[in-house]
Amino acid sequence: MHPARRGELFILTATVLAAAGWLFSKEAILGLPPAGFVGWRFVLAALIMLPFCYQQLRATPLSLIAKGAAIGLVMTLNLIFWIQGISHSEGIGEGAFIMSLAMLMVPPLAWLVFKERPSRTFWLALPVAVIGLFLLTLGNGLSLSTGQLFFLAASLSLAMYFNLNGRFARRMDPVALTCIQLMVVGVMHLFYSAGFEQWPETISAMTWGWFAASVLLATSLRFGFQTVGQKFSDVGNAALIMMLEPVWTVLISVFWYHEPMPLQKVLGCILILVALFSYRSAGLLTWYRAKRRR
């Protein structure tokens, strides 16, 4: 198989694992406290990654490690909103599409915080995404449900994380930076869990199975496949393939939770996907043209 095709296959597998992670997480928190689940999931994932970046971490100045950890606090906030969104939702499909809006929240936050004006393509894609979000929430009248509000907050905090991390990531080894931030997320959630959550006296083997799948498949193996895939595949193809995650999540939710998908929700998902596709494609086209000029 051609290396580029193999890389795209790795990325496609990573999107499926990421979508499955929504299912693993929702099932796991039926028997585990949400913050405790996230804490141990990310701590163990960081420990699994540690041998692969130990030398890079030793060579990294403490000041950079501290800055990377500080950005990890924003990631912590994102995971707090995300796991609460999952726990307050009957399904996971529409939440995945709401979370995917983070890509369209990045430009206005960059404009607000870093004075970087959004492109014309963003302003064309934004109203399409807003209409899609409106159709997703139409079943609640003109209001958002508790779970949808948490997912929207998670999307906003994820956009802030993308803005901060994107400007810092070039200064550190990416695997080492990911390891640090996963550990920060895990430790902060465990501190919260120790202070405010009550662990059950007994935990079923099924719950531990979902937890293990979250750590090994949806976190460690997923990031590994994604890293390998991005190494061999074209950046444009990789970015477009990664947009399939909410699609897989909807299919899983419909199959596993029998999540109702009336016509207006289907149209909402399609409009959000169209907005993301058009915005991402325009950005990739600009990148490709700049690369050709070099």
Image (cartoon, rainbow, N blue to C red):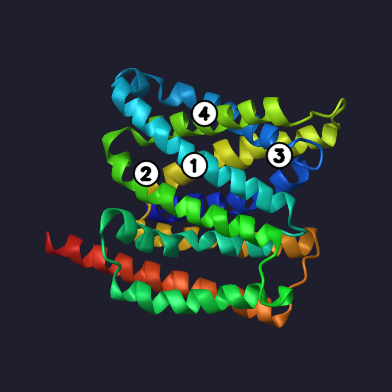
Residue 283 position in % (x across, y down): 31, 66
Q: Distance between the residues labelled 1 and 3?
A: 16 Å
Q: Mark 1 points at which residue?
A: 75
Q: How far apart are marks 2 and 4 (CA)?
A: 16 Å
Q: How far apart are marks 4 and 3 (CA)?
A: 17 Å
Nearest the viewer among 37 and 195 is: 195
What's the amino acid at mark 4? Met
Please give the label number shown on residue 183.
4
Left-right relation of 14 to 52:
right
Q: Mark 1 or mark 3: which comes first in sequence?
A: 3
What's the amino acid at mark 3? Pro
Does the CB distance between marks 2 and 4 fall below 8 Å? no
Residue 208 visible (yes or no): yes
Q: Name the residue under label 2.
A: 165
Q: Is residue 186 above or below residue 119?
A: above
Q: Distance between the residues labelled 2 and 1?
A: 10 Å
Q: Mark 3 points at which residue?
A: 34
Residue at the image point whose x is 81% and y is 37% from the top: 31
